[in-house]
Image: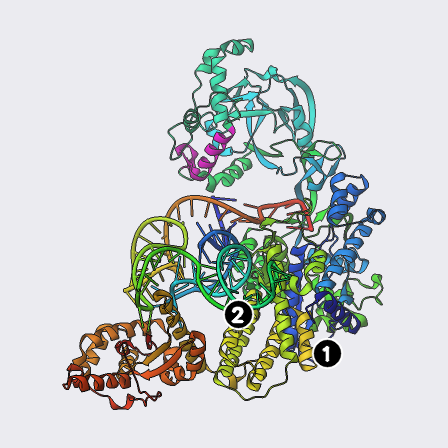
Amino acid sequence: MSYDPQELEAEWRSRWAESGRYEADPDGRDLDDSTFVTVPYPYPSGGMHIGHARTYTVPDVYARYRRQQGDNVLFPIGWHVTGTPIIGAVERLKKGEEDQLSVLRDTYNVSEDTLADLETPMGYARHFIEEHYKRGMQQLGLSIDWRREFTTNDERYSKFITWQYETLKERGLLEKGLHPVKYCTEQENPVTTHDLLEGEDVEYQEYTLVKFESGETVFPMATLRPETVRGVTNAYIDPEGEYVEATVDGERWVVSLEAVEKLELQDHEIAVEREVAGEEYVGESVTNPITGDEVLVLPASFVDPDSGTGVVMSVPAHSPDDYLALEEAKADAQRLREYGIDPANVEAIEPVPILSVDDYGEIPARDAVESHGIDSADDPDPKAVTQEVYNREFHQGVLSEEYGEFAGEVVEDVREELKAHFQTQGEFAAMYDFPEPVISRAGGKVVVAEQETWFLRYNDEEWQAKTLEAVENLEAIPETTREQYTHTVDWLEEWPCIRNYGLGTRLPWDDEFVIEPLSDSTIYMAYYTIAHRLEDVPPEAMDRAFFDTLFYGPEAADDPDERALELREEWEYWYPVDFRCSANDLISNHLTFFLYHHAELFEKSEWPQGITSMGMGLLEGEKMSSSKGHVVLPDEAIDEYGADTVRFFLLNSSEPWQDFDWRAEEVGSTRDQLSRFWNRALEVIDAPDGERDLETIDRWLLAKLQETVRSVTDAMDRFETRTASQQAFYGFEEYLKWYRRRADLERPGARWTLRTVLETRLRLLAPFVPFLANELHERLTGESAEDVPWPEPVPEFEDSTIVVQERLVEDVLEDVRDIVDVTDTDPETVRLYVAADWKRDVLETVIDVGPNQGQVMGEVMQNDQLREKGDAVNSLVGDLVSFVREHDDDTLETLASVDEQSVYEEAASFFAREFDADVEVYGESAARRAAEETSSAERSSADSRAAEPRDGGDDEEPREDAGPVDPDGKASQAEPFRPAIHLE
RNA sequence: GCGAGGGUAGCCAAGCGGUCAACGGCGGCGGACUCAAGAUCCGCUCGUGUAGACGUUCGUGGGUUCGAUUCCCUCCCCUCGCACCA
């Protein structure tokens, strides 16, 4: 019967569903044997793709592994619907937006009839939960306890979040404050990126306003480079623009009309006194608040009244734009006169450098402009030049002497400090704005507004300290991520945790606001432990005291709720989370928040034990994108290849934390491999039982099996799913390939070996390919692989000697092959000569003395007989020194007990088969003596060799009737574990 | 720029101080099987070589070492994150 994944997988799926196999409850097993793995709950604003499939399969494989190890394992799932993405998607659907419709129809195969169901947020979410995620997860065979599902919009979940936020507020970890948000002036409402029509990628900037003065009137000039304030030579205003004089927080300011609304939204008291045309200010002198210098306000068409305050300061020494504008102004005396400015006054303006930077001369802006050959401020190229100057000055610019406490410092290091310094003194103010226009989908202009909001105080020192401790205690996989957590904790400021609208839980004390998604998903793993038993608890009973009792015990409430106390047992049984399988890009927010909230709300013993961070998925080498339709749906992949193939490919092609690349060709080949495995397995299952009558080669395979069990187990413990599955599958296939070549498979001993090997491998593979492995294991033994324990190495079959010996056989095979290839011959006889005993003695000496040529020679030369051999010994020692260096101590020790000659003799028939030749094995000494006898008989005289020592004991009895022969005198080339070879 | 990861043969990718010309997969070449194709199996896939070798390779340039793909430094290039988007 050939491999048919669809049929066999369907059968196992229903078996699992019917038996509720993966529903986990506290049972007799010890707390230490409870394992709780979680994965970020999916956000069903769209469908599931193959990248998600891996995300959820990694914890599944670990869960299955731990179950086989005897643990009680809980792997739950829920659904995250908080916030605006789902609402946004529904809005776009209802408006009939083509992009959205096409994604739904073409990418996710939503039928026309179904579209109507998607027009409410929860209807939309439900569809993707049921038809995509849940379905996909079940098809993949994920061992999830489905009783515990919930969504974050559920009433009871909200009660849980309410408890969490009330508790945090009480502990002083929430704080109210102002926070900049994107704000649509049309709808008079904050907007998210999804609500934007134009400028989706634009980030707002915090501009510094330098408060230039003219008498009592302030001209606030917006800049991103406050440190250049000492280099200001003049100001620019748009003569055509509309400006106002207004009272701002009690001061008299001149700003553009457009700036009024922005300032108002940014928490300034503002009252417009009168509107003025920009040109009225042209030619005026304003005073630099830092230097006290008077500078001229010049007209400039490039000034945008809708950017910042509509008045800008000019720093020609360090800004190419300003430099060019100044040059142009100087060149157009006519225009200056029209505005009543004496051109001589402008001509007199010279750039004032305020910092020095390598690669440029005194006036960086001028150098940059000149070296790039730019001559007009309207030229599009200055952008790049400006960027270059700004970057270099920011990272390398050293502030000049006038800067007092900041003199000699690099801009990058002191900008913030300098800004704060002058702000405190009242010379600077601040304003948020976008560097480019941003338009909402409602068509309104989007500006930055400051809004009252609630923050999580992630920069609270005590809280940080606890969290850092949680980071230290964590098993961070891979280890390199630990530093990223530490870094994130150091860097996090306050986090605004509410939004104006969206799905989710209302802020308990102000129901105008909703707790945002990253903030309502920090400790929900605790909710899984009780989710399936809440049905009978009315939501209104789930108050502070209820959860206090549940999480902190009976003492935490005056009149502890019985139900909460019962649920507490569940929570205590499963918590803490053993592993959270998440993604690299969540380290800097969600995962760190997860640690923060656990560190604060729970005892140390309940803190997360481990986090593994996963990489991303690519499709045919490119990033997946559901909006472009560049995705593979698990559904379709499983239909085509089968769930085991999908799982195996996802887990086997890279370690979890590495990126993986879904390539159809490789997935197809994975399926072929599994299919081949299936066929081979069936052959073993269908063959007669065999019996335990083992030859060396069987023992070799069994020894390799034990090695494999050991390394697969180690890899699984480190979450190295690729290493584990590679070893169990591909790695072992290589051994089997050798075994098939080497052994007579018809023997009962071989059949016994193959069955034993198959059984063990199926158990090792069961976490990865549960359908196939369970099925085959059941056919082989009557029990499924998941019903029997994870394999352990069997001491009886561990045998490093056999492994080392087999290696010698492989070496000889390779060496003979090489010689045959190079000489292009087809030998009829292959002769192997095993090194003489005295050579083994030299090897012993090298091992004893250490791999040092000089020392070894010193030792060896003590021996008269060896000394007589002269150069031969010297070069032998050289080779043996290398040999010893290249092998570890264990191997050398094992080799010491190996009888090399019998290894080859035992393998002789195998060699004969491989080379299709007669194979003869001799001892070097015996062969040599035979040669000497021949030659002495011929010449009737002793040559020099006759004087050589005969270290008696190594003389082997010749195996061939003809006696040992050494036609070409090759025997003397033999070295220990490297027999001399002669082909004829 | 800051933080993290990475650059290995035609491609993907393992190795992370010696058994490394470098696992494995894909692709390619040759052979077996077959009427044929596919699947499967076997061998080859840096160069040279009539004896198991030698030569040149693991982003660049240096260094440490008896020995470096593996350790240290320089530089170049790529990917990800850098916040109120989930």
Query: What residue is shown with label 1?
Result: A27
Q: Regarding mark 1 in the picture, which secondary structure is present there? A: loop
Q: CA distance from mark 1 to mark 2?
A: 38 Å
Q: Is residue A439 magenta?
A: no
Q: Quadrant of residue A403?
A: top left
Residue A146 in the image: above or below residue A263? below
- Can the viewer see residue A525 in this picture? yes
Q: Which residues are magenta?
A: A383-407
Residue A681 in the image: above or below residue A348? below
Q: Quadrant of residue A831?
A: bottom left
Q: Regarding mark 2 in the picture, which secondary structure is present there? A: helix
Among numbered discs 1 and 2, the one appearing first in the sequence: 1
Q: Nearer the viewer, residue A913 or A446?
A: A913
Overall secondary structure of the magenta stretch?
helix
Mark 1 residue type: Asp
Mark 1 neighbour density, 10 Å: few (under 14) some (14–19) many (20 or more): few
Labelled pair 1, 2 in contact (Cβ < 8 Å): no
On the image, the x and y values in percent for residue A688 come to 64, 84
Residue A167 in the image: above or below residue A787? above
Query: What residue is shown with label 2?
Result: A731
Q: Which residue occupies 36% across, 82% down?
A: A920
Mark 2 residue type: Gly
Q: Quadrant of the N terminus of chain A?
A: bottom right
- Can the viewer see residue A603 in this picture? no
